[in-house]
Image (cartoon, rainbow, N blue to C red):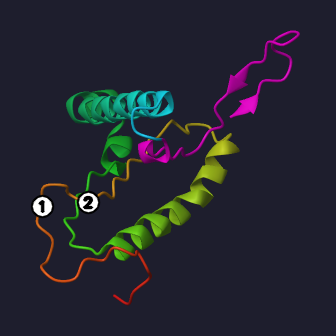
Amino acid sequence: MREVEGRGSGRERWWERVPGGITLRGYDFAPESVERAASDMILSEWVRNQRQIVNDYLSRGEVLLSHDWFEAGIMDVSNLRLTLAQLRRLNDELQELVKPYIKISRAQTEPGARPVQLQINGIPIVDAEPIPGPADVGGAEENS
């Protein structure tokens, strides 16, 4: 977030979201706290918004976008079996990969550039069974 220069008066301050990625984790806040409730509400809205964007792309993208823009989109699912450390490393590497594009996006002035939402979901599947054996509880780096 950054303060909007020239807006507000006295104690009133206006803020705007800086373009780029946002990471919000509900577990950063204590269960039953107001902060956790607000975080959960925001996360729920983000998921709803992500679904809507995917649904719009699938149902109307081919008609509303040029062929090149529609074909440039990709929906890819990779079903992986990872340890806790591997999942953390994967998510860290994905965030690092995206950082240069966030910088490009913030300074974007190229004619024809359009908003793009990158959805990367690297989460453990809650109801799936792990490989039997000692659990990876520490999250220490490991060789893969």
Q: Quadrant of the C terminus?
A: bottom left
Q: Decide if residue 116 is on the left or right side of residue 55.
A: right
Q: Is residue 144 above or below residue 132?
A: below
Q: Decide if residue 4 is on the left or right side of residue 10.
A: left
Front residue of 29 and 88: 29
Q: What residue sits right under mark 1 in the picture?
A: 128
Q: Residue at x 22, y 64 (%)?
A: 78
Q: Mark 1 and mark 2: span between their CA atoms?
A: 8 Å
Q: Is residue 31 above or below residue 90?
A: above
- Give the residues in magenta: 1-29
Q: Quadrant of the N terminus?
A: top right
Query: What amino acid is labelled 1 in the image?
Result: Ala
Using the rendered view, name the quadrant where residue 61 is placed. Answer: top left
Q: What residue sits right under mark 2 in the picture?
A: 124
Classify 10 Å Cα crowding around label 2: few (below 14), some (14-19), many (20 and above). some
Q: Residue at x 34, y 48 (%)?
A: 73
Q: Position of residue 30 (x, y in %)?
A: 46, 41
Q: Disc 1, disc 2: CB below 8 Å?
A: yes
Q: Position of residue 83 (x, y in %)?
A: 29, 75
Please check the rendered image and state whether residue 25 is part of the magenta-colored stretch, yes or no: yes
